[in-house]
Amino acid sequence: MQNRFYLPPNFFIRRARAKDKWKIKELLLTWNDGVNILPMNIYWLGLIIVCLVFLFVHVLLFAALMGIYLVYEIQVKDYSNFWVIDNNGSAVGCAELRIQKRYSVIFNLCIKKKYRHQKLGSSMVEHLINEAKKPVYLSCDRELIPFYTRFGFVTTYAENLPRDLPIALGLTQGLSIVPMILV
Ligand SMILES: CC(C)(COP(=O)(O)OP(=O)(O)OC[C@H]1O[C@@H](n2cnc3c(N)ncnc32)[C@H](O)[C@@H]1OP(=O)(O)O)[C@@H](O)C(=O)NCCC(=O)NCCS
């Protein structure tokens, strides 16, 4: 058929190539009289979608981790080994004593800041020692060695501890804490 219409100079018709795909999609979105039916450039839209997905995945991940933590706290974590120091119905100090078959371990001794230096910590340690199956192990910062020495604890080496204890006492985490034993 004889052509009746001609393209302006510098325009020509060719077959679409694979790399034209995205341009075609973008064109089809401007269907309505050349007005982009989307209120923005498709690339911006893509970027916003990627950001939203990214955010959504992180929110989801955060919610999942919080969920796992809550289930752990409510259903799994056992506070039955804890002792507290009560003052007018509120706990102002706590400590955990895990009694095993052949030994005991003290963890999480903590006195509320306002109540420190009133021998509450010492009373708690003495109480736990009386409750414990000997030997008793714990780990502490070097600065607290004199505090525990008063009760008869001596420093020891991780190699001298029962098999799983170095991990439980946090000695494998590269922190500068020392294991102590009371025989
Ligand atoms: C360590 C802790 C339990 C002591 O409780 P407390 O009720 O103040 O202890 P007591 O009153 O029985 O004994 C106080 C003595 O312990 C020693 N002591 C307490 N904290 C100390 C610290 N951080 N560094 C060195 N010595 C310390 C001091 O000799 C102090 O004597 P002082 O009162 O004349 O200053 C308390 O400071 C605390 O909860 N700290 C934060 C948690 C912590 O580090 N726990 C130990 C886990 S191993």
Image (cartoon, rainbow, N blue to C red):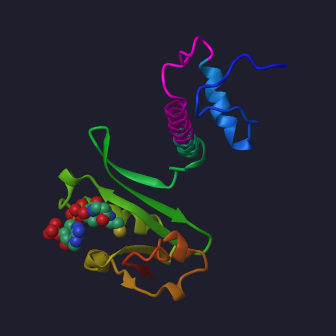
Location of residue 165 with respect to 9 vertically, above or below: below
Residue 86 in view: yes
- Residue in the image at 47% along x and 62% along y: 97
Please report the residue visible at 60 percent of the width from the left and 75 percent of the height from the top: 164
Pick the quarter of the image with the N terminus: top right
Q: Is residue 154 above or below residue 134?
A: below
Residue 102 image offset from top left, x and y in percent: 60, 75
Quarter of the image where the C terminus is located: bottom left
Instruction: Using residue 175 as the reference point, say whether residue 64 is left or right of it.
Output: right
Q: Residue at x 61, y 28 (%)?
A: 26
On the image, the x and y values in percent for residue 155 come to 38, 85
Q: Is residue 150 visible?
A: no
Query: In terms of image quarters, where does ligand 1 lie?
Result: bottom left
Q: Let me know if residue 142 is in the magenta part.
A: no
Q: Is residue 6 left or right of residue 50?
A: right
Tell me the chief SS of the magenta region: helix
Asked whether 34 falls inside the magenta stretch, the response is yes
The answer to which image quadrant residue 152 occupies is bottom left
Region in magenta: 31-60
Of residue 30 and residue 17, the one placed in the foreground of this image is 17
Please determine whether, in this image, residue 98 is positioned above or below residue 82.
Answer: below
